[in-house]
Image (tube, grey):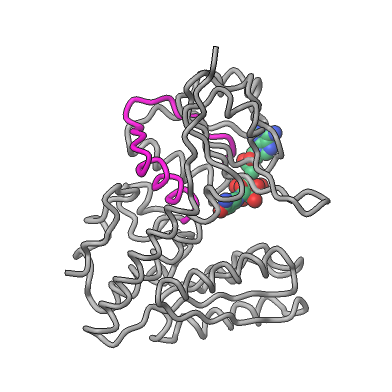
Amino acid sequence: MAVAAPTLLDGRSLSRSVLDDCRSRSELLAERFGVIPHLAVVLVGDDSASAVYVRAKERACERAGMQSTVVRLPATSGTAAVSDAVGSLSADAGVHGIIVQLPLPTGIDPAAALARIPADKDADGFHRYNVGSLFLGQSAYPPCTPEGVMRLLDHARIGLEGANVVIVGASNIVGKPMAVMALSREATVTVCHAKTQNLAAHTREADVVICAAGSAGLITGDMVKHGAVVVDVGINRLSDGRVIGDVDFESVAAKASHISPVPGGVGPMTVAMLIHNTVRAAERSVGLSSPHPGAEKTGSSTGSSTEVS
Ligand code: NAD
């Protein structure tokens, strides 16, 4: 029996339309307020993967008609120097979004550096105020990767209400906020992690599997049910330079109804959401937003393109 090919959750194409929407909003901000949304990235050391990610963020800013600044510091910088660089950007009214590219070199405390990013410039959505707001279903700056996953699902019209959603990975930046977002859409959520016993027993029950474990090929075809939606957040670099996800694409694609590729799935959406959060911060800096963060629903399928009116 011929098996229908799954629908690809194409993050590359969707991210382009998010960035184009951001560009329209940037142009409006420039015309009406003389404000150009500005993302500042603090990059410490010379990790090659980090350099690639930062370049992708710069390119996304260009596409969205935004300004970007990369503050480069040597790997030998201490925690105080990195924190001070973040502090200077925080005090700069012309900067709307700030991120510290992680991981930082050994010996630099990421928590200390991140603590200097104020909640209203928190483009990554990592600030404890924004994390708490997400928990209440009200975040103005949702964390980029899970929000990108929600956008991919929304775009494919995959509703989560009543669905069994299994999230593999329980980190603070992906798995946990992903669980909160899925729960706020009234999914029944299971969160698995490295200590979970019999992972396959959980994933086989899932209507939607979202894998963010950082383990190449962890999810195989025998671990998902026919017709499941499978989102692969993982990024694993092989010794030959190839980048693959956590999902064994071939065997899972033979059973899934929808699947996200790596590369070209969640990764570009993460960058697009970073840009989106920065544009939103710029809008809020001139008073163009809902009166309080609670009025903005996280993971909204309608996005926020009508905020500038
Ligand atoms: P992390 O290391 O902080 O957390 C990994 C989580 O997965 C932990 O909860 C751990 O318990 C769980 N886990 C690990 N191995 C497991 C296994 N065999 N079975 C079940 N659970 C397991 O990682 P993270 O920062 O959340 O990132 C996870 C992956 O997602 C990495 O590959 C990372 O590169 C990738 N990532 C991708 C994007 C993107 O934009 N596509 C963004 C962030 C992270």
Q: Is residue 243 magenta?
A: no
Q: Residue at x 27, y 79 (%)?
A: 29
| Placement of the N terminus among the 4 image quadrants | top right
Q: Quadrant of ligand 1?
A: top right
- Give the answer, above or below, for where 172 lies relative to 170: below
Q: Residue at x 37, y 36 (%)?
A: 183
- Give the answer, above or below, for where 166 lies relative to 94: above
Residue 231 visible in image = yes
Q: Which residue is drawn at 76% across and 66% down?
A: 106
Residue 194 visible in image = no
Location of residue 109 (image quadrant): bottom right
From the top left corner, tell me how far across and down residue 47 is, in percent: 74, 68
Q: Is residue 150 magenta?
A: yes
Residue, far front: 2
- Give the answer, above or below, for where 118 lies relative to 295: below
- Give the answer, above or below, for where 34 lies relative to 96: below
| Placement of the C terminus among the 4 image quadrants | bottom left
- Numbered range of the magenta stretch: 144-170
Toward the viewer: 109 or 239? Answer: 239
Location of residue 83 (image quadrant): bottom right
From the top left corner, tell me how far across and down residue 44 is, in percent: 68, 75
From the top left corner, tell me how far across and down residue 23 is, in percent: 35, 71
